[in-house]
């Protein structure tokens, strides 16, 4: 029969010590592995951009995108209310100052123009009739004054003759006195008629002036109405390129509504939008002849010089770098094989360079490329 196996206390203690030692060794290995840093990843040197920190002058520039726009742009508004009857010229066509772009229709305005012209003709006829009538009255007044003057001269001659005859005793003194009275009466009448003639002449001129003013008023109104009718044919007034016709045939437009936009194509400027505390729009005048192919609405990019900095530490602008901020950059070791992440303070920036305020010194080499793929590592190896 089987006999039970008996384990000595000494062997049992040795086995327990062996188990404990193995567990302790496993714990030590585990702790060691957790404290080990991950191996530095290898990076292809040809796949990253490396630059050297420098000290010296730096030109600050900003770059922006924009478009070429005409300097001389004119919107043609509607001078009168109307309906779009025809569109004769479409955008993209060169136009002259008197080219008819589109035509409006307004029957009521046509009727108003005809009525105003009729009233102007009536006022002209009334002026002519008044002038003839006043001239006739003036002639009658002159004839009456001439008769009174003739009677006065005859009476004066008779009075002078009677005075001489009375002095010689050839006629009675009463006859002389009567002739003197008649002469004085006609003298007064003659003076009154001359005054009346002068006043009548001034009155004629005043009445004619009033009628002339009415004629000019009617003519001006007729010209205005006719010009409004003429303005139903929309003309640009300048030579250029028709850019926009924002209306359609049959559309009703009001006074002042924009009907077309014309630009002078050979006078362009660049409108650049620069990201500076938001988006700032900068107008740039183009000097000299325009380059071949320049046209309105052509996309352009521009570089604007802000300032020239002297004796500063700077480096090529890293990816994702912001001015007056901090960024983590991999600085190359002296052997050029490894690179360690360092915290770099940045200052003023330009298009392709940025000021270094801390963390680097002239002569240091850093990786400028996007290193977000290695954010979990503080070191990399360059291959």
Image (tube, rainbow, N blue to C red):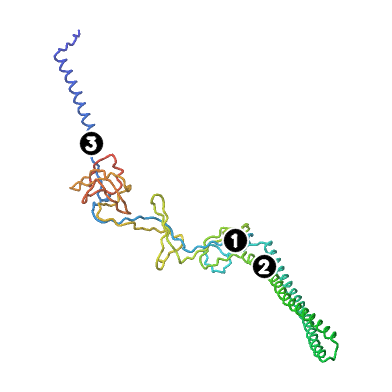
Residue 252 lies left or right of residue 19; in this view the side is: right
Could you tell which of marks 1 and 2 lies nearer the N-terminus?
Answer: 1
Residue 67: x and y in percent read: 43, 58
Residue 376: x and y in percent read: 28, 39
Residue 135: x and y in percent read: 75, 77
Most foreground residue, 127 or 86: 127
Answer with the quarter of the image where residue 61 lies: bottom left
* Mark 3 or 2: the one toward you: 2
- Residue under label 1, please give it: 78
Residue 214 lies left or right of residue 308; in this view the side is: right
Q: CA distance from mark 1 to mark 2?
A: 25 Å
Label 1, secondary structure: give it: loop
Q: Residue furthest left?
A: 10
Q: Which mark is residue 37?
A: 3
Answer with the quarter of the image where residue 118 lies: bottom right
* Mark 1 or 2: the one toward you: 2
Could you tell which of marks 3 and 1 lies nearer the N-terminus?
Answer: 3
- For image coordinates 73% across by 77% down, the residue present is 195
Q: CA distance from mark 3 to mark 1?
A: 78 Å
Q: Does 231 appear above or below 156?
A: above
* Mark 3 or 1: the one toward you: 1
Residue 69 lies left or right of residue 176; in this view the side is: left
Label 3, secondary structure: give it: loop
Circle 3 Cα neighbour tier, 10 Å, few/some/many (<14 / 14–19 / ≥20): few
- For image coordinates 30% across by 49% down, the residue present is 347
Label 2, secondary structure: give it: helix
Could you tell which of marks 3 and 2 lies nearer the N-terminus?
Answer: 3
Q: CA distance from mark 3 to mark 2?
A: 99 Å
- Residue under label 2, please give it: 217
Circle 1 Cα neighbour tier, 10 Å, few/some/many (<14 / 14–19 / ≥20): many
Most foreground residue, 376 or 151: 151
């Amino acid at each position: 029969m089987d006999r039970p196996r008996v384990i000595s206390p000494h062997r049992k203690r040795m086995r327990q010590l062996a188990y404990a030692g193995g567990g302790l060794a496993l714990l030590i290995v585990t702790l060691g592995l957790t404290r080990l840093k991950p191996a530095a990843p290898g990076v292809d040197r040809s796949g990253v951009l490396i630059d050297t920190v420098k000290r010296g002058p730096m030109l600050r520039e900003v770059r922006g995108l924009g478009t070429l726009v005409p300097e001389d742009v004119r919107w043609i508004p509607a001078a009168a209310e109307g309906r779009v009857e025809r569109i004769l010229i479409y955008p993209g066509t060169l136009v002259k100052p008197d080219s008819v772009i589109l035509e409006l229709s307004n029957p009521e305005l046509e009727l108003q123009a005809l009525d105003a012209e009729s009233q102007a003709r009536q006022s002209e006829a009334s002026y002519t009739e008044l002038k003839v009538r006043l001239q006739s009255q003036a002639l009658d007044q002159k004839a009456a004054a001439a008769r009174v003057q003739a009677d006065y001269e005859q009476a004066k001659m008779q009075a002078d003759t009677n005075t001489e005859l009375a002095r010689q005793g050839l006629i009675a003194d009463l006859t002389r006195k009567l002739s003197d009275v008649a002469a004085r009466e006609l003298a007064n009448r003659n003076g009154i008629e001359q005054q009346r003639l002068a006043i009548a002449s001034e009155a004629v001129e005043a009445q004619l002036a009033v009628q002339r003013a009415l004629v000019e008023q009617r003519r001006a109104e007729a010209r205005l109405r006719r010009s409004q009718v003429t303005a139903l044919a929309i003309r640009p007034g300048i030579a250029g390129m028709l850019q926009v016709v924002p209306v359609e045939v049959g559309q009703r437009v009001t006074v002042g509504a924009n009907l077309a936009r014309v630009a002078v194509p050979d006078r362009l400027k660049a409108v650049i939008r620069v990201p500076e505390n938001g988006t700032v729009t900068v107008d740039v005048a183009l000097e000299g002849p325009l380059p071949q192919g320049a046209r309105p609405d052509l996309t352009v990019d521009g570089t604007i010089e802000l300032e020239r900095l002297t004796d500063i530490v700077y480096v090529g602008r890293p990816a994702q770098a912001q001015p007056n901020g901090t960024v983590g950059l991999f600085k190359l070791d002296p052997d050029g094989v490894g690179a360690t992440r360092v915290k770099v303070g940045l200052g003023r920036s330009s298009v392709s360079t940025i000021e270094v305020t801390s963390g680097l010194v002239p002569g240091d080499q850093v990786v400028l490329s996007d290193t977000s793929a290695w954010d979990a590592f503080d070191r990399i190896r360059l291959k």
